[in-house]
Image (tube, helix red, strand yellow):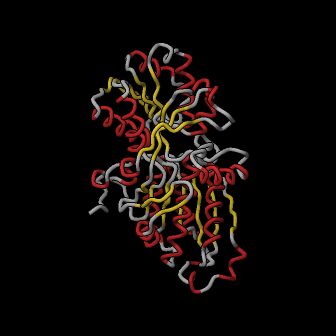
Amino acid sequence: MKRKLTSVLVGAALAAMAGAASAQISDGVVKIGVLNDMSGLYADIAGPGSVVAAKLAVEDFQKTSKAGLKIEIVSADHQNKPDVGSTVARQWYDTQQVDAIADVPTSSVALAISQVTRDKGKAFLNSGAATSDLTGKACSPNTVHWTYDTWMLANGTGAAIVKTGGDSWFFLTADYAFGHALERDTEAVVLKNGGKVLGKVRHPFPGQDFSSFLLQAQASKAKIIGLANAGGDTINSIKQAAEFGIVAGGQNLAGMLMFLTDVKALGLQTSQGLIFTTSFYWDRDDASRAWSKRFMDQHGGKPPTMVQAGVYGAVLHYLKAVEAANTDDGTKVVAKMKELPTDDPLFGKGTVRADGRKIHPAYLVEVKKPAESKGPWDLLKIRTTIPADQAFRPLADGGCPLVK
């Protein structure tokens, strides 16, 4: 098993300051593991950038905290495989005194880590996975789902497309938990708004050759080909669709989960006019720009994706809860995270619900035309802000057993 394992000690100089406030911290250290895809098709949206984001959260927490906590960040590559992720998580929890795991894109891995974390009584701060099941039927008292989910994507992008005439759909879906959830949630929105689904096809994850699937979509004559995949799969789907002349032939593509790095990889000439939903854009306001500059200085000049921004917000709020609860017991800390209001420069003020869903606004964005862009990462414009109380699935509708 190939696995990259790094460890960065943060705040060691503050150890001498640790007094009664950290007396309930097991082994005297709050240790957070960033677990994600460090080298594969999701490495650009999470990867090493999420480690940078976690370290910035520690840095900002230490500026205002009086607890004198000693905090350590470790990281590993789950290779988008649930068995690999589960093995790392158990090793971290059982032998390396890790208190919380953050990020974890790839829904199948995230669902596995959520269960391991619950069994061990630790804390799971998910940013990268999309499946809304994490706060639905598979919710856990030890899991917080921070950044986005398939319900948010479906209702933001799907509803906007149907209401502007895209009322017949064909889904091209990644064949695993994430793709299934995104297809399910988007289909529900299409039907609810009066549209119809003409067909669907599922491709292997990760995929390389999408030609046979795209030809099926083309033959369906659906107005919209919904791409229920992500990262490199979405990029390759769009590139190969262009080779088949699908958009030129009158059909439109809907990238149901797009990231800033996807747009960059495709280029504005190819991706201009695409609309999608995100919960963070680095150039949204002064606060997001200021934080993103710090991030870019440590990440090769690349701005944060919404997943990396979510790692920052989740880790910062987790540390505030550790301080407030005076413990690193995972179950107690997650309960405290739900009690405390959230507030950070990237997502603003918000809350964590009983089902573990973090609540904040989302944004329907459009990819700029080449002539509109004023810089290498000036790629998006915000069309609509979706209010926090409308951005995510209503609490009563998810089927989470924690909701009374």
Please indicate, yes or no, whether residue 47 appears anywhere in the rendered image.
Answer: yes
Corner quadrant of residue 172: top left
Image: 238 above or below 150: above
Task: Relative to 269, say whether 382 is above or below.
Answer: below
Quarter holding the C terminus?
bottom left
**Residue at point 53% right, 35% down?**
206
Residue 387, image x, y percentages: 40, 48
Along the viewing direction, whichever of 296 and 205 lies nearer the viewer = 296
Residue found at x 61% / y 85%: 19
- Horizontally, residue 297 falls left or right of residue 178, namely right
Q: Is 361 in front, or is 150? A: 361
Query: Horizontal and vertical percent for residue 313?
Result: 54, 58
Q: Nearer the viewer, residue 342 or 192?
A: 342
User: Could you say which quadrant of the image residue 358 lies in?
Assistant: bottom left
- In the rendered image, residue 69, in percent from the top left (x then y), is placed at 61, 76
Q: Position of residue 391 (x, y in %)?
A: 39, 47
Q: In the displayed structure, would residue 213 be above or below residue 396?
A: above
Q: How many marks?
A: 0
Query: Can the viewer see residue 121 in this picture?
Result: no
Image quadrant where residue 166 sits: top left
Q: Residue at x 44, y 18 (%)?
A: 251
